[in-house]
Image (cartoon, grey):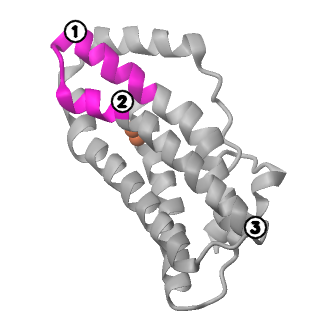
Amino acid sequence: MMLESIHTEHGYINRLLKILRQKLDAIQNGQPVNYSLIKDIVEYLQKHAECCHHPKEDLLYRYYQSHYGKSGEMQNLEAEHVELAKLTHEFADAVDMILMDAVIPLDVFAEKLNTFVMRQKAHLEFEEKHIIPLIRRTFTAEDWIAVSAEYEKYDKCEYDPLFGDKVAERYRNLSERLSA
Ligand SMILES: [Fe+2]
Ligand SMILES: [Fe+2]
């Protein structure tokens, strides 16, 4: 159940990264870009993905390591969660500056956008290809009962404001863009 939701969320994040990739192409081709949509995506990643997705993974990585031995790869991923949060924060600032008409050269912004997309994508692809399969083949039924109980203690992330049943007003535009 937890792995399924992590996998589903990776699919959501991937869809958002794909839109960012298209924005990057548009900027590089000198086409006009809707920066508020970039802002919406970054905000969703900050408010939802960072608070609900990463903690779920951290819990699994920590459980794995306390029961099956240290994994350098998992330690790296946990550290990357912290780095990605920082990167996202910095990128959000750059988007805000553009929206406030501060002067940022477009090539500088494009470079930040490119780095942002590449780092996020590399992270989730590594999890999908290597770490989720490893956890899936390692964890026993008892392990799943234990981690699920642990997760329920602090899970306040039932509601997804963008991909959930009811789209929050805040993400109406982005949701329409996603289904276009
Ligand atoms: Fe992760
Ligand atoms: Fe992830």
Magenta-tinted stretch = 56-79
Q: Would you say the magenta stretch is mainly helix, strand or loop? A: helix
Residue 68: within the magenta?
yes
Disc 1 from disc 3: Cα separation: 47 Å
Name which residue type carries label 3.
Leu
Horizontal and vertical percent position of residue 100: 79, 66
Mark 1 vs ligand 1: CB below 8 Å: no
Question: How much space separates mark 2 and mark 1, taking CA atoms?
Answer: 17 Å
Residue visible at 36% across and 31% down in the picture: 79
Which of discs 2 and 1 lies nearer the camera? The answer is 2
Is residue 1 visible in the rendered image? The answer is: no
Q: Quadrant of the N terminus?
A: top left
Question: Residue at image x 32%, y 35%?
Answer: 77
Query: Picture quarter containing residue 114?
Result: bottom left
User: Which quarter shows the C terminus?
Assistant: bottom right
Q: Mark 1: few, some, or many residues within 10 Å (few <14, many ≥20)?
A: few
Indicate left or right for 37 with 10 as reference: right
Q: Is residue 150 above or below residue 118?
A: above
Local crowd at mark 2 within 10 Å, few (<14), some, or many (≥20)? some
Ranked by sequence position, the earlier of labels 2 and 1 is 1
Secondary element type, mark 2: helix
Q: Residue at label 1?
A: 67
Callout 2 amino acid = Glu
Instruction: In this rendered view, identify the residue nearer to me: 119 or 98.
Output: 98
